[in-house]
Each structure stands twice: as structure tokens, then as C-alpha cells.
Image (cartoon, coloured by chain):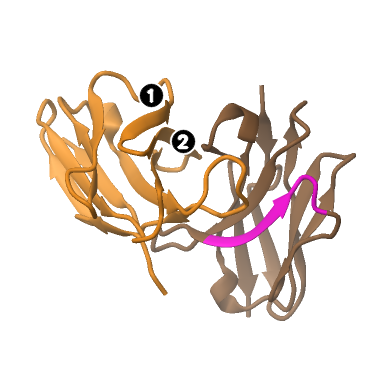
Chain colours: A orange, B brown
Amino acid sequence: EPEVTQTPSHQVTQMGQEVILRCVPISNHLYFYWYRQILGQKVEFLVSFYNNEISEKSEIFDDQFSVERPDGSNFTLKIRSTKLEDSAMYFCASSEGGQRSNQPQHFGDGTRLSIL
Amino acid sequence: AQKITQTQPGMFVQEKEAVTLDCTYDTSDPSYGLFWYKQPSSGEMIFLIYQGSYDQQNATEGRYSLNFQKARKSANLVISASQLGDSAMYFCAMRFPNAGNMLTFGGGTRLMVKP
């Protein structure tokens, strides 16, 4: 069964450094998302991406964050200058359909980001 | 504002018994989708089951079923014949088409299956 893949599984970075989290969505999916889950807390939406542009973003997704689809398969999340509070599990997800669809969002296994 | 509440932070169930995980929500939007995800200790998020607000019948998917009570604004997950591998966090999530395509998650319920 096709799946969303994320790399790396664990990233350790010094505060203030830039980090790029990588995702390969399911190949026939058109909608891509990033969520994060701070340890012990609920999953929070960051951003959604469709047709090569951001379609929605949350308040968490400030100027320090950016997303890109550099080629036909990868979808990346960049954090420009990491802060301690960016430490979390970051999930990439993709779906076949959008708002009016009953298609679920399929999640990758996550990247655990630890900021020192 | 839309809000999702999972009132049971943790639950135990005996292997082979059925268990119900609660999810209530608050919205004035008539159109929405309800999803349940499982998160094992390894961390991945696994889609389990979907219910649309206009669906006439409760969704079922193998051992998973949704007890959807629209008037009560609840969408409880029922797991029949629990297995040890069902031990995990379970998240209820909703999508509101009029508010975009994002999922809004509840706080989760940790289910522990006893042998």
C-alpha cells in the first residue's frame, strides 16, 4: 500500500540553526499538509499546500516557516532559525481530495525534531 | 469556533472485549467530516475510519465502528474484540469544509488492552 515517507526520522539541531524536514507524499495525491505534535499534546495544523501554493496556514506558521515542492515528488518544511519551542514531532500528510471530499489525510511516520 | 473534546485521557479494556472511545464536538457548521486516527507508541498516525455529517448510516471498518449521534454532536469510536495491538493513543479529528481542508484534533485517549 502506498505511504507517505518522511526523512529524517529524528533531527537534532542547535537553536538558531535552519532545518529542513523532507516528505514524499503518496504519488497520486494533490493536497499536502504539515502538522506538529509537541510531546504529550494534541496534533496541531501548520499549513496546507495545493497546486504549488499555500492554501491555508495556522497562526503557528509564521515567517520562520516555509514550505516548498522542489520537484514532482518531494514536499519540504523549512524552519529558518529554530527555537527551543520548535521541538516537536512533525507530521507530513497528503490526501487525494480537498475540502469537499471524504478522502482521509494519510500521515507519514513523523520527524522528531529536537532543538538544543 | 469549532472544538473537539475527548473526555477520557486513558482507558483500560480486557482483551477480546469491546470498548468505546468518546468524542464530542461543537460546531454550527452543518457540513463536516469526522475521522479517527490511531497513534501507536512508535509515533505514526494511522487512519482508521471516516464519517460524513450527512451520511445516513454509521461508518464501519472491520473491528472499528462509529457511533455517530448528530443531534448530540458525538462520534464515538467502538472497537470490538480488542487485541493487544490495539493499545495506542486514539485521536478524533474533524474537517470543516467551510473552514478549509485542515484537520482539527481532539486531545486523544490512551487505550491500554489488558491480557
Q: Nearer the viewer, residue B9 or B21?
A: B21
Question: What secondary structure do most residues of the magenta stretch adopt?
Answer: strand
Q: In the picture provided, is B67 more to the left or to the right than A75?
A: right
In which quadrant of the rendered view does residue A14 lie?
Answer: top left
Image quarter hosting the C terminus of chain A: top left
Q: Within 10 Å of the Cα at label 1, are there few (<14), some (14-19), or many (20+) other Cα atoms? A: few
Above or below B67: residue B100: above
Q: Quick check: is A86 in the magenta stretch?
A: no
Q: Which residue is located at x 64 percent, y 29 percent?
A: B98
Asked if labels 2 and 1 share a chain, the reply is yes
Labelled disc at residue A60 = 1
Q: What residue does disc 2 label?
A: A44
Q: Which residue is located at x 25 percent, y 18 percent?
A: A63
Disc 1 secondary structure class: loop
Residue A59 locus on image (x, y percent): 42, 20
Q: Which three-letter amino acid code belongs to the residue tagged 1?
A: Ile
Which range is magenta? B47-55
Q: Quick check: is B48 in the magenta stretch?
A: yes
State which tag comes first along the sequence, 2 or 1.
Answer: 2
Residue B65 locus on image (x, y percent): 75, 65
Disc 2 secondary structure class: strand
